Image: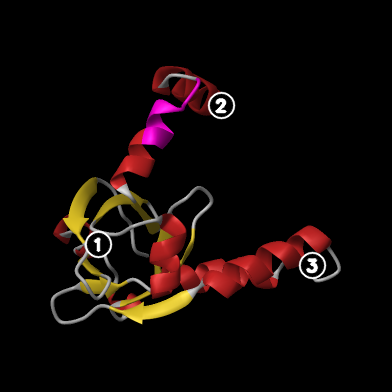
Amino acid sequence: MSSFKGSDTYVVDAKGRASIPSKMRKNLEPQARRTFVVTRGIEKCLYAYPLDEWQRMEMSIRLLSSANEKDRFFARTLMQWSEEVQLDSQFRLLIPKTLLDFAEISKEVFFIGVIDHIELWKPAHFKKYIESRKESYEKVVEHVMGQKK
């Protein structure tokens, strides 16, 4: 099971490649076979799932009901944006142009490890996201962690 944490900013080259931060790639499981599935995120970012974690995601999608309109919409949208990519010998991820355009990533990408996947953000978009939060981190922690008994 791959597990990611931390953050870093890297350059995106002219071909749309960016190196996966070393502190994240060291946690990439061999079962992932240096393969990621990159897809649209919930906010204006991208999600990169290593193959082992993507296979878990696909299993949960298979459990959705094709009779439910929201389930169909979610599955179609997620799969429409999903691209399987191999890390090259320098551990660079080739980010598909359609996904770069969606997230408005051009020269730099901000990587965030979020346990089972890596989020890729345009640095300015992530900064704006953080600044737009109406509640402090402390209040959110109190709400989220306070629910656990």
Residue where numbered disc 1 is placed: 27
Residue where numbered disc 2 is placed: 149
Residue at image coords 67%, 71%: 76
Residue where numbered disc 3 is placed: 65
Residue 24, position as x, y percentages in the image: 23, 58
Q: Nearer the viewer, mark 1 or mark 3?
A: 3
Q: Are the residues flagged by discs 2 and 3 in contact, CB closer than 8 Å?
A: no
Q: Nearer the viewer, mark 1 or mark 2?
A: 1
Q: Amino acid at mark 1?
A: Asn
Cα distance between the residues tagged 1 and 2: 30 Å
Cα distance between the residues tagged 2 and 3: 32 Å
> Could you say whether the residue bearing mark 2 is in a helix, strand or loop?
loop
Residue at image coords 15%, 82%: 89
The earlier-in-sequence mark between 2 and 3 is 3
Q: Residues within 10 Å of mark 1 (few under 14, many from 20)?
A: few
In magenta, the rendered stretch is 128-134
